[in-house]
Image (cartoon, rainbow, N blue to C red):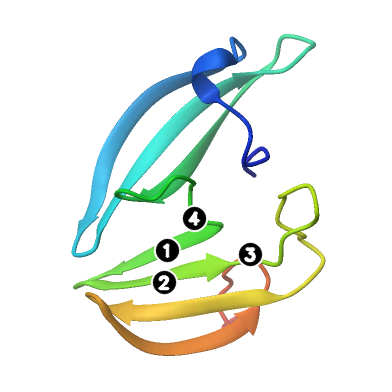
Amino acid sequence: MYPSPAWDIAADAGYTITRTRWVLTEPPVFEIVVDIVTPIGTIFRTASYVRACEPHPLDGFATFGDGLWAVYRGVRTDAGYVDAMRDGVWSFYAGSTLIGTVAGTAGLLSNTP
């Protein structure tokens, strides 16, 4: 889950970036891992994925190895949040080449039991 587009991590004392790493070089995608302190003091860790030079994290991201990866683009509410109850689109890539799309929710699940 990512806050609204107006949110600034640098100004929010409850969020601490704990690590960053490159996950793809073509196209360049990096991971930002953040520890979040809730109002009652519990801490949980979350990761966001960002394409280089884009202002906001991807709504969803998966990598399958050998240059295969997928990105989810969700339906946004008026406040800028992804509406988890509505289907968005997963786009699948080999490197920078789009190889297919499928409608679905943000959770990319296996179709095997």
Horizontal relation, residue 93 to residue 42: left or right: left
Pair 1/4: label in front: 4
Q: Residues within 10 Å of mark 2 (few under 14, many from 20)?
A: some
Q: Which residue is identified by label 1?
A: 62
Q: Secondary structure at mark 1?
A: strand
Label 2 sits on what residue type?
Ala
- Is the residue under label 4 in contact with that under label 3 (CB below 8 Å)? no
Could you tell me how far apart the alpha carbons at marks 2 and 1 are, in whole angstroms? Answer: 5 Å
Q: Which residue is identified by label 3?
A: 106
Q: Position of residue 30 (x, y in %)?
A: 31, 46
Could you tell me how far apart the alpha carbons at marks 1 and 4 are, in whole angstroms? Answer: 10 Å
Q: Residues within 10 Å of mark 1 (few under 14, many from 20)?
A: some
Q: Secondary structure at mark 4?
A: loop
Q: Residues within 10 Å of mark 3 (few under 14, many from 20)?
A: many
Label at residue 79:
none
Q: Nearer the viewer, residue 27 or 64?
A: 27
Label at residue 70:
2
Q: Which residue is identified by label 4?
A: 58
The answer to which of marks 3 and 1 sits earlier in the sequence is 1
- Is the residue under label 2 in contact with that under label 4 (CB below 8 Å)? no
Label 1 sits on what residue type?
Ala
Residue at the spot x=46%, y=68% of the render? 71
